[in-house]
Every structure is written in structure tokens, then in C-alpha cells.
Amino acid sequence: MLENCRNARERWGGVSELIDRWLKERQELLVHYCDLSGESDYSQTEALRGKFVRLCELLVDYVSTGHFEIYEQLVQEAREFDDGGLELAGKVYPRIEHTTEVALNFNDRVDGRDLTEEDVNALFSELSKLGEMLETRFEMEDFLIEHLHNVHAGKVASA
């Protein structure tokens, strides 16, 4: 029994560390998003292109980490605790998937292109929509972390 407790702490404690790193990535993404959204001189297309490219790199990394690392761990934890978390995830993940499509479509508009001033203007228009989508996504992710991971933290610590 003691060994099972140790295994649970090691397994889910690692999830906490993974989530913490991911949330730091989120913060970096938000810093770059805010920096870019604060720009007002759209004529500096090359400098802005670099900022859009960096934002997209962070965006794709963040989204990928969520899908290929975080969500898998949260679902595994929900499966092992078997307390309704799988059903909850089944309702929320499709909504998160939609935000992923929006993020990847934004990335595709920037990826590998030389940007004209007209392109930059269009991207800034889409940037505000991306910000709204990110806010929605972060709320859903926080909800999942709270209901699929944090809810079990006490059980793991006392195990």
C-alpha cells in the first residue's frame, strides 16, 4: 500500500510540474501577444513579421504541449480516479479543439510569408479575435485542470 501511495505521488506530482511549466509557457505567450497587440506602426512590416512569427511559434508550442502532453495526463488521471472526469473531458475537449483550429489557422496566415502592410493590417484585425479565442481556451483549460487534476491533489497527498 505504501508503494502505491509513493507511485501516485510520483505520477501525479509529475503532472503538477508539467502543468506548471505549461502555465509558464502560457505566460510567455501572453507577454508576446500583448507586446504585439500594442504595436501601432504597421509600416514596419519586417519587424512586425518577426514578432508575428515568434508569437506563432509560442502559440503552436503551447497548443501542442496541451494536446500531446497535458490533456493526455489529465485524461489518464481522470480514468484512474474514475470520478466523472472522463465525461467532463468529453464535453470540454471538443470546444478546446475548435480553439486549436483557430490558432493553427492564424499560424498558417503568417508561416513562411513575406508580409505586406495590407497583410499586417489584416493580421492585426485577426489578432484581436485570436486574443478572444485564447481567453476562452485558457478558461476551459483552467476548468479542466481544476476538475481533473487539482481535485485529486488532496487524495494523492494523503495517499
Image (cartoon, rainbow, N blue to C red):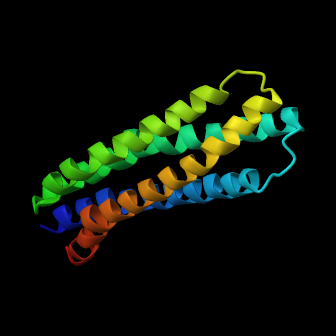
Name the foreground residue: 25 vs 45: 45
The mark total stands at: 0
Name the foreground residue: 65 vs 141: 141
Where residue 94 sits, quadrant-wise, is top left
- Could you say where residue 4 lies in the image, as x and y percent from the top left? 17, 62
Q: Please state if 103 lies on the left or on the right of 45 as rendered.
A: left
Q: Please state if 77 lies on the left or on the right of 54 as rendered.
A: left
| Residue located 14% across and 60% down the image | 81
- Could you say where residue 66 lies in the image, as x and y percent from the top left? 42, 46
Quadrant including the N terminus = bottom left
Where residue 112 sits, quadrant-wise, is top right
- Could you say where residue 121 lies in the image, as x and y percent from the top left? 74, 38
Name the foreground residue: 34 vs 157: 34
Quadrant including the C terminus = bottom left
| Residue located 57% across and 53% down the image | 131
Q: Please state if 97 lies on the left or on the right of 23 as rendered.
A: left
Name the foreground residue: 69 vs 127: 127
Q: Please state if 31 lies on the left or on the right of 6 as rendered.
A: right
| Residue located 57% across and 42% down the image | 59
- Could you say where residue 124 lies in the image, as x and y percent from the top left? 69, 43
| Residue located 72% across and 21% down the image | 113
In the picture shown, does residue 104 fall above or below 80? above
